[in-house]
Every structure is written in C-alpha cells, then in structure tokens.
Amino acid sequence: MGKKKYVYLFSEGDASMKNLLGGKGANLAEMTNLNIPVPQGFTVTTEACNKYYDDGEVVESEVIEEIYERMTELEKITGKGFGSLDNPLLVSVRSGARASMPGMMDTILNLGLNDDTVEVMAKITENPRFAYDSYRRFIQMFSDVVMDIEKRMFEDILDEMKKEKGANLDTDLNADDLKELVKKYKALYKKEKGEEFPRDPKVQLIESIKAVFRSWNNPRAIVYRRLNDIPAKWGTAVNVQEMVFGNKGNTSGTGVAFSRNPSTGEKHIFAEYLMNAQGEDVVAGIRTPHPISKLKEDMPNIYEEFLKIVNILENHYRDMQDMEFTIEEGKLYFLQTRNGKRTAQAALKIAVDLVEEGMLTKEEAILKVEPKQLDSLLHPAFDSNALKENSPIAKGLPASPGAACGKISFTANEAKERAEAGERVVLVRLETSPEDIEGMIAAEGILTVRGGMTSHAAVVARGMGTCCVAGCGDLKVNEISKTLEVQGKVYTDKDYISIDGSTGNIYGCEINTVEPEISGYFEIFMKWADEIRTMKVRTNADTPRDASQAVKFGAEGIGLCRTEHMFFAEDRILAVREMIVAKNEEQRRKALEKLLPMQREDFVGIYEAMEHRPCTIRLLDPPLHEFLPHNEEDVLGLAKELGITVEELKATIDSLHEFNPMMGHRGCRLAVSYPEIAEMQTRAIIEAAVEVKKNHGYDIVPEIMIPLVGEIKELKFVKDIVVTTAESILKESSIDMKYLVGTMIEVPRAALTADEIAKEAEFFSFGTNDLTQMTFGFSRDDAGKFLKDYYDRKIYESDPFAKLDQDGVGILVRMAAEKGRQTRSDIKLGICGEHGGDPSSVEFCHNLGLNYVSCSPFRVPLARLAAAQAQVKNKR
Ligand code: ADP
Ligand code: MG
Ligand code: MG
C-alpha cells in the first residue's frame, strides 16, 4: 500500500476533492486546471488536520517532510526560493474548511520575510517602503494569529510612531520609519514570548499551519459549526500560496467580485476594488473602493480579461460566484472563487434564472437555496435604512425571527387590552407562562429576560410566527413598578422598544418595519419543490388563524392540534378550572358540558380552515396544574367564582402538585383517571366534523391522537372510550364518516413495543420533543442551562431538541417505524416534534419513509424545500 498523501499541489487537485482539500483549496485547484491565472501553491489536507488532533496536537514528521517536498516543487514552479537571498518566495497561509466558515481564522500574508529577505525584496523591487510595509504587516499577523499576542499592542506602537512623526495615515510613514517600526515590533515580540521572532521561514510556515489546525477548535468556530450543522470531524485544510502584491503602486490593486448581485440576484457583475492595496483592505472599509466600471476606464485590457474569467467561472460552476482578485503591476490574478452567499430573495431569483437560462435542471436548482433562509422571507423586517441610524441597547437570543416594534407592556393582560384598543405593544416579561398566551398573541413581539431557545416564550412565539428575543439578561425588568432598566436608562410602558428576533438585537426606540413580500420567484421555486418531493408536509396548528396561515404557506394537513391551547382563553379558563377542582365525576361532567360547545366550535373553525385536508387532533396532554392560578390574588378570585373556600381551593392545588410534572399525571394518564374528559373531547371532534361535512361537503376523516402512550393496554382503554363515543354520535347523525385513532410515540417504551401498539393504533406520530427529553433523561426546559458546558467540552455538537439525535433518539424512531409496519403495513407515520421543521431532521424522516412531517406554520415552506432536497439527494 502506498503512503498516504497529505499535501497536494494546486495542479494535483480538482473541485470534486472538497472534502479533502476544503472549499478554497479545491477551487484553487479547479481554477488552475481551467488555466485561470492563480498564484500557485499547495494544500495540506483536512486529513492532516484530523491526524494532527489524533496525534495529540502535533504535526508528525512525515507530514512536515511532505510539506517541504511540495515547497521545493513550488520553488521550481515559481522560480523563486523560500528564504532565498536572490529571489525570495513569499507565501500566504489560508485556512479553508469544506464549508466556508467566515472569520474562523485570519489569513497570514507575506510569510517568508525576515531581516535578510526583506532587504533582498527591497532591492529587487527597488521599493524599500513596500518591503518593510509587508514585513511589519507580517510580524503583526504572525504574532496575533499564531502567537496570540494582542493585535492592539502593535497598533498602539504604530499610533505612537505616527504621532511622533506627525503622520496622519499609515502611508505617510516612509521606509526608514517602517524599518524602525519593525525593530519595535520585534522587541515587543521578544518581551511577550521571551524569544526572538522566528527568522527561519520553515519554522514560520509550520507554526502557521499548526495555528490553522488549532483554529478549527476555537470557540468562534465551535459556535459557528453548531449554528450551521457542520460536524467537528470534517477538519480544516490549509492553503499555502505564492504571494502576489496589489500594493506595489499604481498599476497594482485588489478587489472582490460577485458574478450576480448577491442581494437582489440581478444578473450583472457586482465588483469593487482598490488600487495600491493588499488583502482585506477592500472589505475593511478604511478606504472607499471603486466600482468595477472605473477599471474599464483605467485598465481596459485587464477589465476585458476580468470579465472573461468571471463568465468562465460562473458557467463552469453553474452558480453565482464570489471571487477575489489582485492586479500586480498590470497582471491579473484570481485568488479565490466560491458559490457566493446571498440573501433569500437573491437565492430564489438566481435559482429560477439559472433554470431558465438552461444552466441547471429543476432538481439541481432546488439544492441551491438553504431551507433555513426562507424564514427571512416570511416575517416582517426592520427597514434597513432606519436600522443603520440606531444601535442596539442590548442583545438576547434570536428565539423567533422577524422584527417587532411597539410600546412596552409588562403584563400579558395589559398587552391584550392595549392591543385591542389599537395600540402596538411588545410584551416584556421576566419569562412567560401558559397564562400569558393571549397577551403573547396580541403583542407584536415578545422579549424575555430569562429562558433559552426552547423556553416557553421561544417555542410558543415560533409556533405563532411572532418575533421573540429570549434570555436577555442585561435587562433589569421590574414587573411591579413596570420599568425596564438597561445601560443606566429607565424605560416605562410609555416608551417604544424594537426587537429583532433574527439577530437578538434590542433597540430603545421606534423603528419602522416592512411587511414580507412573497415574490413571483418564490412561488415558482416552491412549485418545483412540491413537484419533486414525495413526503407530505403538515402543520402544527391550534387555531383557525394558524391553520389558515399554514395553508397559505402550503401545509397539506394538520399533524398536531393541541386542544389545551384553547383552554387558556378568557371565556373558558373558568370552566376548565371547574373541571379540574371537581370532587367527583358528576361535578366534572357538569364542567365538561360547558366546555363541549366551545371545543366543538374550535374544531369547526379548524376543519373549515383546512377544508378537505386531514387533521390530527390530540387529546388533552399537559399536567392539570398548568391551568390553575399561581398567585394569591388569582386564587382568591377563582375560589369566589367557584363558590368554594380559599382553603379548599388551595388544598386542591396542593394535591395537584407534582415533583416532576413532565413525567407525572398527564397525557393519556388523564383519560385513564377521568374517561369523561376523553369522551367530551371525542364528542367535540366528531360532532364538529359531522357539522362541517354537512355544511360544506368536505370529505373529513378525523384523526384522533392519544398522547404519551407507553403500554398497549392503556391505549386500548382510551381508544375504547373514543370509539364508543364516536360510533354513537355517527349512528345518531346517520352520516357515513371514517375516522382514525392513533397515538404519539413519545415515551421510549412505546417505541420499544411499537409492534404491539400498532395493533390498536392506526397511525403513529413521533412526538420527538418528549421522546428526546425522555431518551436523554433531561428536561427541555432546563437543559439550556448546562448544554453550553457540553458544547464547550465537545460532548455534544448540537442541541438535540433542535436537531434530531439520529444516533440515539433516531434509532428509536426507526425501530418504531419498522415494528409498526410489521404489524400494520399501511400504518400512517409522521413526526410532530420541533424537528419537523429542521432540514437535516426532515431528511432523516424522508429516508425512513415517513408519510409526513409536521411543523409550525412559518416553517412549512422550509420543510417543503427540505423534503424536496431530501428526495433529490436520496431518491426513494
Ligand atoms: P478569507 O477566509 O477571509 O476569505 P483569505 O484566505 O481569502 O481569507 O485571505 C484574506 C485576504 O488575503 C483576501 O483578500 C485574499 O485575497 C488575500 N490573499 C490571500 N492569499 C493571498 C496571496 N497569495 N496573494 C495576495 N493576496 C492574498
Ligand atoms: Mg477570501
Ligand atoms: Mg408530548
């Protein structure tokens, strides 16, 4: 077996080798193959990075040898020598993972300079200023990026020197000044590190390569990976490339280009450049760059060549390209190309245009838009001009996207009242609870001081598509005195606040929002996605309003209707509480009688909104104490309304207390204790279906879902109640209607015994929120507090409540699906946890052959696209 190869010349790779060479390296190789002028170099592979970690953070000598071998070849290609005193080869060291990770590590330029080579450079270029300017930049970059010496210390020295010399700009310093600066830099280095700045270019090189490997695990990179679903095991590659200099005078320059407009998608080249500049000067914004049209005037030949190459690259990659170029003394080089990042609008327009231009098939185009990006098209956003004029007063977690602006409201009740009176309000709470639901619905947006991405406020807000910023600990909120204090300023309920749920930013003023516009491209694109996908997409919706919204977004049914969400409405909470504190069945039935017409009316609304589409309605699920009042005042009020003593009521509330309510008296356990609740709910579901069928002729097949089942007998017990009730109503109404009774798979025991459960259940819906909670054995309301430690210590890479844990929880899902099908080959399978709106989890569900995923209305388009992409990637 041949020796494993860890280092590739650009001429040895190509675009298909992204996994090994990283995106930047693979594309530099591909451009080399296309005969595009690229400064040559080599790539140290991602496998070398992984090996570095496997070997205990050392670069083994066999890899070092290979790096030196390629360096020798690069010397031949360039006709220069690394460390040579005749014609020194200078290189850049650039990181490049499989997926681009902006800001993971800073690039090191001008490597190979030392006290000797700098003199040679000065002589050959006849430009000592340029040589020493490059040298001082290199010392600073190397010290900062490789040696962790604070950049600021170098900048301070530079500022001091500028003051001393009466210089305004860096460029006002002459060669002698810069020479002196280099001396000071090296002295600083020695003071900080206790040793001389490394002279040997080989040492400079290996140390820089190690720094790139290390940067793969810096905190910024870990956070970025988690947000973007990038596995730690990918590793990063390192590119070593001959330097070209855009800072050699007035026939040199550097710039960036997009082959189409990245913010609108329009088909025209969008590029900017600066003359006499190096590296990131264009992006850094110190000098204002020129539009590319100026290049056409100043250097028409270069401009022509530039255009030609941009077109070659776009046609070759069949996608919008983001490129870097440098002109060195009248010669053009390309330094990078990649599929460009773009706004959601641009992504849709470009995908549709490329199909119409015959460059892509619909299947290929479908893969060009990130499902998560669609989100930004579905929510209001701040007017970008208005945003520029304001800076945030605090930042919390971006819990539910969109933008909201309104006056501060500190209680849910007040939010509701003020909204009804026509005022725009933002609900600001320490944290929210189910009692706040009406205020949350009425508010433009929700801001909490405590709680994470899966807190009550976050989950409910995402479900409603309302903007939410959660866990903003910098705010001091006093709900009693109704004040919010931050940065020494106090805000009251008369003040405006603006919150951005996409960034987490909070502004202490009024900022205008703009409504989302669903353009023609969006529609065309989604139609293609629907043609391609095989898995259905339903929605989790509890109200007719949410249901209609979801239908507008393309939902094909309801996968989860939580009946209890309706219980908190003002006109029913009393009846619900009566039911809960009832002392016997008779009292309970009386309270349920009051609830029946209201529930029926809810379901009528939902069936009407969904027309002929299927609806899965879940029987009562949460622990009952959630419906009871918690503070003294409310308890007094309720006792009075119920006509019982405060002591009696308190005793009941106490008796409902549970140590671990999420594993307590809830789900189907409630129906086992109080069958009459299931009876009333079934009655409401079936009667509503009958009524809507009669009135509108919709072909309704109600799907009644029994939650939290772990044992076939408990399912059978509740199912018998449901069936008896349903049959008697249908017989009475002499309407011929099919209905289904199924269960959620959310207790691990249900997954383990799914073959048994399927004897009674006509469908399974995977409740992966609870299933994740119970499989991991940690509560989703509390896990946020310690999951961060798990990310920092690299135990978990992502939040299992957001991205389905395919290796653990996913095994249970797979097992249950298989066992369910063994017993009942046509069993209907779906998922209704938060994961139904997560692209990688949607792909997992597609691969298991689930019939549908169900997610909150605002995630429906995302799920439709993710399902189409899953079909293109893994046809079944
Ligand atoms: P990023 O990840 O920020 O894109 P890059 O590796 O692309 O980092 O490099 C940062 C800047 O340095 C870019 O402007 C790039 O064009 C420039 N640069 C990198 N390598 C060279 C080189 N060999 N010659 C000239 N400029 C270079
Ligand atoms: Mg770059
Ligand atoms: Mg559940």
Image: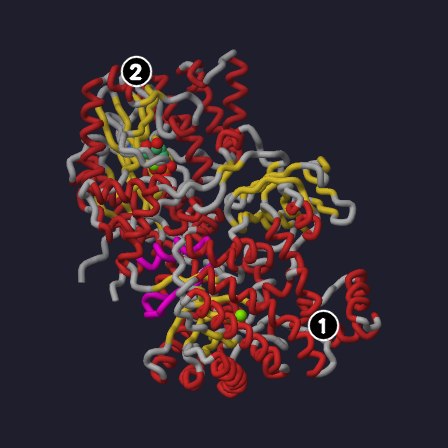
Q: Is residue 62 visible?
A: no
At a point 33% along the width and 64% down the height, the residue shown is 535
Which label number is shown at residue 250? Answer: 2
Answer with the quarter of the image where residue 359 lies. top left
Give x and y (percent) for residue 346: 34, 39
- The correct choice, above or below, for 479 with respect to 834 in the image is above
Along the line of sight, which residue is nearer the eye, 874 or 527?
A: 527
- The correct choice, above or below, for 699 with respect to 431 in the image is below
Look at mark 1 in the image and give the residue it sits on.
578
For the N terminus, which image quadrant?
bottom left
At a point 39% along the width and 45% down the height, the residue shown is 101
| Residue 268 is inside the magenta segment | no
Q: In the rendered structure, which disc, 1 or 2, sits on the residue that comes first in sequence?
A: 2
Answer with the quarter of the image where residue 120 lies. top left
Along the line of sight, which residue is nearer the eye, 108 or 523?
A: 523
Q: Amino acid at mark 1?
A: Glu
Q: Is residue 630 left or right of residue 600?
A: right
Give x and y (percent) for residue 438: 63, 55
Instruction: Tell whether circle 1 marks a residue whose Cβ is less than 8 angstroms from ligand 3.
Output: no
Along the line of sight, which residue is nearer the eye, 682 or 482?
A: 682
At a point 48% along the width and 45% down the height, the residue shown is 379
For the C terminus, which image quadrant?
bottom left
| Residue 850 is inside the magenta segment | yes
Report the mark closest to the observer, 1 or 2. Answer: 1
Give x and y (percent) for residue 547: 48, 59
- Marks 2 and 1: in contact by CB < 8 Å? no
Q: Amino acid at mark 2?
A: Asn
The 10 Å Cα crowd at callout 2, few under 14, some 14 to 19, many 20 or more, is some
- Residue range in magenta is 845-868
